[in-house]
Image (cartoon, grey):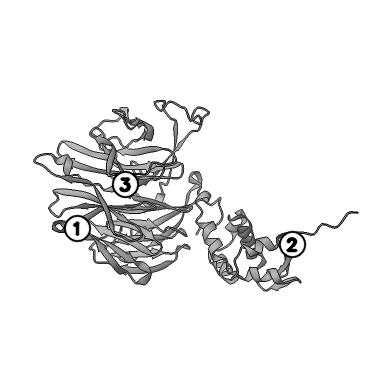
Amino acid sequence: MNFPTIPHESNVVVSINVGGRIFQTTKQTLTLAGTDSLLSQLVVTESTRFVDRDPDLFSVLLYILRTGNLPARSRAFDVRDLIDESRYYGIESFLIDSLSNSSQFEPFDLRRSRILQLNGRDSPSSFSPTLIGGGLHVAHGNKITSFDWSLRQKSTVLTNFSAVDSLLEISPGVLAAGATDFPGLQIIDIENGGFVRTTLNWEKVARSSSTVQAIGSSPEFLFASFESSRRNSNSIMVYDLSSLLPVSEIDHCEIYGADIDSAIPSTKLRWIQSCNLLMVSGSHTSPSGVNGHIRFWDVRSRNMVWEIKETQDCFSDVTVSDNLSAVFKVGVTSGEVSYADLRSLGTKDPWVCLGEEKKRSLNERRGVGCKIESYGNHVFCSSKGSGIELWSEVITGLLGNASRDVSEERVFRKNSFGKLADSGENKITGLAFGGNRMFVTRKDQQSVEVWQSPSRGISI
């Protein structure tokens, strides 16, 4: 005898009438919305439930609930309408996640989608994407302006700094901010009107007036690069990220006589998650040229693992990519991008030029002011003008072999974009990434450009 199959409760089909259109889904899909949402309440309804809302907008939200991603058809809708609908159904967090999902980032199809205008006459000096939601905090002059996940301006707060030079969100709504001409690293609660929770200083009392040169973080630690007021010593302090109590001090340098190299403070701090190392870098310009250092620190043991001393074609900027297992720099003289494989840092000259460095005169200084950042499997460089170079590794069968000889040259391909007719010759001063967005600042512009891929859903 064959008995009828009893469907599992989570697979029971539920019918919903939205604005006259019937949608069918499962109880399992609707319960994903959470107990406080309207959709979860529809699960207990046996008959078809009528909802007097827009059916086309509902179809987009149902797709997001099912897949976690935006459908291509969402480009036809205004994001404000989607926001209002998601709030009505109680699933705004799902829309936020889909809009800020880094897997939706399409580097080869980035287009400028929006300009975030800032109040006042000051250009952005530093900015930090939010940890969740794809929002942004922008420092301009003595102000910090915050934008939410929909890029709507939330607030502008005044700080004690004349100008904020370093900015980093360390937890939702909480920023670490510092300046090169004002002492201390301030922890600012943006959600409470810019309230300063505490001010962190270099450990030694005699150096309490030390200024901040850079900020970085890892899942456990907050890092701050300090320089003494007399500019004859510098150090990096390590703080516990949850308690903000000092943990240790690394990379402490004092200047001795004519040894200028030891006085160079670190102006960039990047955590390498795969290696559990902190990369620090700094450079100095003198009449004889530009020199600098790139160091890799084991924070727990307080040991410096590697050091690259930069003299010929020192970097204008440097970054590290966990995904690509490499350090990248843009040369201050050549303006060309080079990389060093993380597995070959012990060699005398680890750099491999990706451009045409040998064809350039080392007296041109083509890379002055260029910025470089990595995101995902790609490296972005604002080289030699108002455009952007996108470097991506060409994957071959050999590269997929884990036993590949690290001395073998890797293959990278360059794409160029971002040079806008209305940007004039305004050089890019900053690059940052969050979710599926790239943020760009330019010299003398009181705004931030937002770049997104139009092929991946709506552009805000």
Horizontally, is 72 left or right of 283 in the view?
right
**Disc 2 from disc 3: Cα separation:** 53 Å
Q: Residues within 10 Å of mark 1 (few under 14, many from 20)?
A: some
Query: Mark 1 or mark 2, which has the lower sequence index?
Result: 2
**Considering depth in this image, is 343 or 349 the residue closer to the camera?**
343
**Residue 308's x, y, as percent?**
27, 35
Residue 173: mark in rendering? none
Query: Mark 2 or mark 3, which has the lower sequence index?
Result: 2
The kind of residue on which mark 3 rests is: Arg
Task: Kindly check if marks 2 and 3 are in contact, taking CB atoms under 8 A apart as contact.
Answer: no
Q: What residue lies at 82% left-to-right and 57% top-to-bottom?
A: 5
The kind of residue on which mark 1 rests is: Asp
* Quarter of the figure with residue 15: bottom right
Please give the residue where the numbered disc 1 appears in the rendered image.
Answer: 181
Image quadrant for the N terminus?
bottom right
* Quarter of the figure with residue 145: bottom left
Please give the residue where the numbered disc 3 appears in the rendered image.
Answer: 300
Indicate the secondary structure of the residue bearing disc 2.
loop
Horizontally, is 34 left or right of 42 in the view?
left
Indicate the secondary structure of the residue bearing disc 1.
loop
**Disc 1 from disc 3: Cα separation:** 30 Å
**Disc 1 from disc 2: Cα separation:** 64 Å
Please give the residue where the numbered disc 2 appears in the rendered image.
Answer: 12
Q: Residues within 10 Å of mark 3 (few under 14, many from 20)?
A: few
